[in-house]
Image (tube, helix red, strand yellow):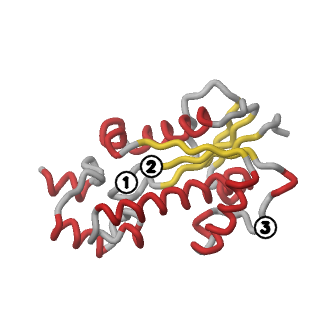
């Protein structure tokens, strides 16, 4: 069994062509776990948002962000691990055990365990995935107002047909990842 407190950590936004990668770290209050916590990808947007409200109001959590510039400089894997590290360090509680989604661990001096498909195996990681997803979707929705026409409010920066068409018609924004193939190829 793991030592408590247990922190679940997950990230979102590795695949998009635009926007930062976001990570969340959470320590669940066992008495107040919302019904329906699951891998964020398996929940409807509405259900995710309802559960997210319960999680952020009743549990200790923190967000970690790695910027587009950091993604382009150190690569998406390293940026994801950096966002995870920042999320854990932003928590106001010292962890005993950290459960991390995936097979790589951030650079931290704690008892950490990588769990492949952790967002479907660990309720703590699933909760972190929900918080990170809702946070990033809202951020991309806000950025879509600043950079209209890319449909980030719908595609969250992923390379959908609409997004790729907008890239061709409107060009590259400062929020696009210049190291990612479609944008890199446009610029070089």
- Label 1: element kind: loop
Q: Earlier in the sequence, mark 1 or mark 3?
A: 1
The residue sitting at 73% across, 44% down in the picture is 27
Is residue 90 shown above or below 53? above
Q: Are marks 2 and 3 in contact (CB under 8 Å)?
A: no
Closer to the camera in the image, 7 or 102: 7
Circle 1 crowding by C-alpha within 10 Å: few under 14, some 14–19, many from 20: many
In the rendered image, residue 18, in percent from the top left (x then y), is placed at: 34, 56
Left or right placement of residue 4 versus residue 186 in this view: right
Residue at the extreme top: 109
Name the residue tied to disc 2. 21
- Is 81 or 166 nearer to us in this picture? 166
Q: Is residue 154 above or below residue 98?
A: below
Q: Which quadrant of the structure image shows residue 46?
A: bottom right
Label total for image: 3
Cα separation between marks 2 and 3: 27 Å
Q: In the rendered image, which residue does mark 1 sit on?
A: 19
Residue under label 3 = 35
The x, y position of residue 20, in whole percent, is 40, 49
Does dot 3 land on a helix, a strand or a loop? loop
- Residue 38 is tagged as none
Residue 144 at x, y = what percent? 35, 65
């Amino acid at each position: 069994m793991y030592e408590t407190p247990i922190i679940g950590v997950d990230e979102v936004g590795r695949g998009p062509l635009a926007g930062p990668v976001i990570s969340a770290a959470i320590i669940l209050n066992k008495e107040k776990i919302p019904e329906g916590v699951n891998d964020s990808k398996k929940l409807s947007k509405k259900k995710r948002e309802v559960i997210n409200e319960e999680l952020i109001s009743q549990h200790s959590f923190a967000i970690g962000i790695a910027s587009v510039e950091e993604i382009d400089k150190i690569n998406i894997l390293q940026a994801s691990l950096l966002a995870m590290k920042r999320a854990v360090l932003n928590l106001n509680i010292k962890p005993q055990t950290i459960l991390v989604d995936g097979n790589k661990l951030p650079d931290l001096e704690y008892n950490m365990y990588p769990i492949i498909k952790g967002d479907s195996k660990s309720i703590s990681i699933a909760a972190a995935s929900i918080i990170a997803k809702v946070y990033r979707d809202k951020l991309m929705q806000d950025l879509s107002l600043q950079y209209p026409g890319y449909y980030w409010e719908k595609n969250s920066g992923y390379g959908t047909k609409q997004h790729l068409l907008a890239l061709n018609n409107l060009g590259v924004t400062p929020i696009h990842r210049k190291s990612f193939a479609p944008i890199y190829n446009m610029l070089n």
